Amino acid sequence: MDERVIRINNAAGYVESILDGRKPLVGLVLGSGLGQLAELVEDKVVIPYKDIPFFPVSTAIGHKGNYIAGRLAGKVVIAMQGRFHYYEGYPMEMVTIGIRVMKALGVKYLFVSNAAGSCNPEIGLGDICVIRDHINNLPNPLIGPNLDEFGPRFPDMTCAYDLELQKLAFNKAKELGISLKRGVYFGSTGPTYETPAEVRFYRSIGADLLGMSTIPEVIVARHCGLRVFGVSVATNCANTTNDSVVLNDPQDVIEQADRAAENLARLLNEMIKSL
Ligand code: HPA
């Protein structure tokens, strides 16, 4: 058996033994500052990554390192409170292992959230944006021998972000009085923020939101057939000039993400209720 499958099965076997018969329907990845969504989970079991065989531990600021399993809006969910980024130095297999473990546990839907810089003047600080597509500027996590037991060699990415889930988000946001934007997420390796020239370039090719995560998880999720919903919180406006010095500050990113977290939690809760 492929070594990667052995690692996934070992990790999934451990998590399954702790879940004790609970079968999660929805997987969530909670990005920077959004980890507090996990507080809404009821009958919670906390599984530290450090206890899971073959799992890395997250080192990024604002990221805890736990799976949280339990009930959200009446559904069994498993959330990653803290994710792995390529810039932390992990190989792509490890950046995405949490998603394949969720698949092995029976998850059907993946909800991913992140903090992102806006390069679209119509997306302002603290705005919640449904991801409608992405542009990948990170290494593809499916490079290497294909894991046929998870999915095909050449996965289609036309509707990577599920159209019905996007529609559901807008319907629920309207009912809840939450304003939602929509955008294309551009992912780079980081850990540097973009230069103004890069921001102008990415904007010119169709990016609205800039980040350093999410895309590897979404690619691996689509490879294994999970239905994906992605959402970004615009935590800073990316600089398009350097005529004056306005630096990106990671602390601002976390504060803005925290401010949006309550509305985002209400939205995800209502969406999950309808699945
Ligand atoms: N660029 C890249 N990643 C980010 C940003 C940004 O401006 N803000 C939050 N994550």
Image (cartoon, rainbow, N blue to C red):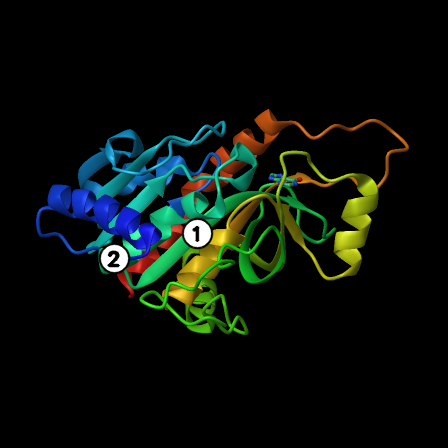
- Furthest-right residue in this view: 243
| Identity, as a three-letter code, of the amino acid under mark 1 | Val
| Residue 255 as seen in the image, left or right of residue 275 | right
Number of residue marks: 2
Mark 2 surroundings within 10 Å by alpha-carbon count, few (fewer than 14), some (14 through 19), many (20 or more): some
| Residue 80 in the image: above or below residue 274 | above
Residue 72 in picture, x, y percent from top left: 24, 50
If the image is split into quadrants, where does the N terminus sit? Answer: bottom left
Quarter of the figure with residue 126: top right
Across and down, in percent, residue 104 comes to: 25, 57
Residue lying at the far left of the rendered structure:
21
Residue with the mark numbered 1: 112
Q: Nearer the viewer, residue 99 or 147?
A: 147
Q: Residue at x 35, y 47 (%)?
A: 98
Judge whether 204 appears above or below 31 on screen.
below
Residue at numbered disc 2 = 104
Q: What's the distance in space between the residues labelled 2 and 1, CA to CA?
A: 18 Å
Q: Which mark is residue 161?
A: none
Q: Is residue 207 left or right of residue 55?
A: right
Q: Is residue 100 left or right of residue 202?
A: left
Which amino acid does the dot numbered 2 rest on?
A: Ala
Q: Is residue 85 above or below residue 129?
A: above
Q: Is residue 248 visible?
A: yes
Quick one: SS at disc 2? helix
Name the residue at 70% across, 41% down.
237
Provide the secondary structure element on which disc 1 rests: strand
Given this view, does label 2 or label 1 mark the residue nearer the observer? 2
Q: Indicate which quadrant contains ligand 1.
A: top right
